[in-house]
Amino acid sequence: METIKNALDFSDFPRLDLIIAVLVLVFLLLFPLLPFSAFAMATMIQFLMFSIYGMGWNTIGGYGGQVDLGKAQYVGIGAYTTAVMLIRWDIPFWVSMPIGMCLAVGWSFIIGYPLFRLKGHYFAIATIATSLVLKALFEVWTFVGAARGLEISPIKYDPPDFLRLIFKEDVYYYFVILGFFILGIFYINWFRKSRLGFQLRCIKDNEAVAQSLGINVRWAKVKTYAIATAFVSVVGSFHACYIKAIEPEDTMSLDISILIALMAMLGGAGSLWGPIIGAGILIPLKSYLKEWLGATAGLVGIDLIIYALIIMLVSAFEPRGIWGIIEKIRRRRRK
Amino acid sequence: MALLDVIGVTKDFGGLRANDDISFSLDKAELLGLIGPNGAGKTTLFNCISGLYPVTSGEIIFDNEDITGLKAHDVARRGLARTFQVYVASGDLTVEENVMVGCFMRTRSRSEAKSRADEILEFMKLRDLADYLVSELPVAAQKRVTMATALGSRPKLLLLDEVAAGLNLSEIEDIMASIRSVHKEMGVTVMLIEHVMELVMKISDRVIVLDYGEKIADGNPAEVAKNPKVIKAYLGERYVREHAQELS
C-alpha cells in the first residue's frame, strides 16, 4: 500500500513539470486519433521502446553511476525467448514475456556478480564484451536460427491476436507499449525514492561511505542491474512481436547498447524524465534525418554525424544532460 | 566493560607500517580522543576498525564479537558507525534524504526511515536545512549532516573523523555541544580523531596519542598533555605553556 502511494507521489516536482508531463501524456494517448503517417507511428513506437530501455538503463547507469554498455544482450534474450516460444510451441506473449524476463534476470545475476568486481571503465568494457559474446553465440546457435534469425509469420495467426500480440495495425502495438511506458514511469518514480534508490546514489558518490552505512555495495549493484535488465527484456519481447523478424545483428548489436546509454545520458542520467527526454529528441531526429537527408538528398550517414555532434556538445557543456541544464537554470533563478 | 578491544593491530601498506601493534580498549559510554601529527595513522586505524582496510595482523573485538576481517558493511550492521573527513552520503540528495540513507540500514520502509531521520535532524539542529542539497551547504552544516547520517543507523559506537576541521570558533562550540549530547543523551560511545585541541581536551574522558603509527600515550587529557613524548611529537612547548592552567 505504501509502495503504491509512493509510486504515485510526484509531489517533489515543480508544478510546471507536472503540467508538461500531463500534457505529454494526453498527447501520447490522443496521438492515434490524429492524422498520422505510418512513418510517424513507427517513430512514436520506437520512441516509447527506447524510453523504456533508457529508464531501465537509468537505474544502474544513472542513479547507480555504473556505465553499462551491454544492455543489447538482454534485448536479445527477451526477443528470442518470445520468438522461439511462439514459433516452436505457440506460447503467447503474455507467458513468454515473463519467462524471458526471468531468463534475462537470471543471466544478469550470473554475469553481474563477477562483473561488479570491476569499476568504472573496466566495468563498461566488460559489459560490452559479455554482450558481444552472447551475440556471437546466438549467431551460430541453430536452435534460434543462427545468423539468419527467426521470423514470426503473421499469416498463421488471426490478427488482432491480443494474446500473442500479433496485429496488422501498428496502433495496437502503440497502445501496448504505451501501457508499459506508463507502468515504467510509476516504477522508476517509486524506485528513485526507495531504499535501494537512495543507497545507489550514495554508492555512486562514494563507495567507502556507502559501506560504512551498512550497504552491501556489490549486492546493491547486482540487484539494480537485474532491475535494469527486466525493463530491457520486456521491451525485447515486445520487439519480437512488433518487428516479427529478429536476428542477432539487429537485436543484440553494440549499436543498440550504446544508443540506450547515450539517450539516457543525453536526457539526463539519474533523473526520472531524463531518458524520456533523450529518447524524445534522438529517436525522431535519427529516423527523420535518415529519411530526409539519406533518401532525399542522398547524404547517407549524415544523420550519424549530426547525432554525434549533439552528444559531444551536451557532454562538453553539461555532463548531466539536458535535465542537468534545466536544473542548473532553475537553481540560478531560485538564488 | 569494554565495547571495543583493539589488540595488537598492525597495518602495512607495502613497506610502510601505518599502524604498529596498537592496542587499547574502549569502555561503553566512554568518550575517547585520538590525536597525533599528520600521517601518524589515525585515519588508517579508523579504517581498520570499521573494516574498510583488512588488518595485516591483530584482532578487533566489538561488543564481544571478533569483527577482524569482516566487510565494512557487516561491521556497520553490528552497530559501529563512522564519519569521513570530507564526504557525506550523497551531494545529490537533500539533507533529510542523506540521513535517511543511514536510517535505511535498520528499516526497509520509507516512511519509517523518514520519521527516524526527522527525529535525528531535530536532535542535530538541522531541521531548517532538511530540504537543501548537501552540496549547497557550508562546511559546518555538512559536518553535522555526516554525523546525523551516521546516527541514522542507530550505532553503539560512533567514530568521528575530524568533524571540527575547518570550522570557526563558534561552530566548534556548536559541534562540541552536539557531540556531548550524542554521547550523553543518546548514550552512544564516541571515539574521535581531532586536531582541534580545545575540543579534544575539553570533552574527552581519555586520549590516545599516535606517532609514526605507534601508540605513544594513553590516559586522561591532563596526563597526556604533560607527557614529554606527546609534547615533543605533537603538542609543542607553546601549547603546554598557554594551557598550563586548564591542564593542572
Image (cartoon, rainbow, N blue to C red):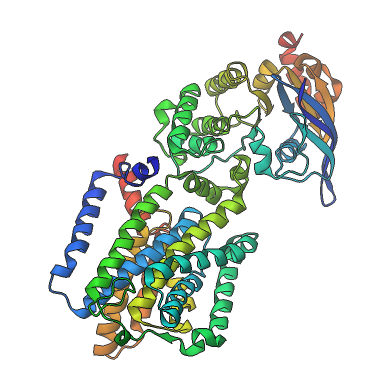
Q: Position of residue A211 (x, y in %)?
A: 62, 44
Which quadrant of the figure has residue A212?
top right
Q: Is residue A273 visible?
A: no
**From the viewer's perspective, is B196 left or right of B153?**
right
Q: Position of residue B61 (x, y in %)?
A: 78, 33
Q: Front-most of A294 and A316?
A: A294
Q: Front-most of B211 and A85?
A: A85
**From the viewer's perspective, is A126 left or right of A146?**
right
Q: Front-most of B178 and A185?
A: A185
Query: Dividing the image into 4 quarters, which one contains the C terminus of chain A?
Result: top left
Q: Position of residue A270 (x, y in %)?
A: 43, 54
Residue at image location 69% in from the left, 27% down from the top: B191
Which quadrant of the figure has residue B24?
top right
| Marker count (numbered) | 0
Q: Position of residue A223 (x, y in %)?
A: 54, 55
Residue at image location 50% in from the left, 64% down from the top: A102
Q: Is residue B154 visible?
A: yes
Residue at image location 46% in from the left, 90% down from the top: A148
**From the viewer's perspective, is A164 left or right of A73?**
left
Q: Front-most of A295 and B226?
A: A295
Residue at image location 52% in from the left, 87% down from the top: A146
Query: Dividing the image into 4 quarters, which one contains the N terminus of chain A?
Result: top left
User: Against A165, is B1 above or below?
Assistant: above
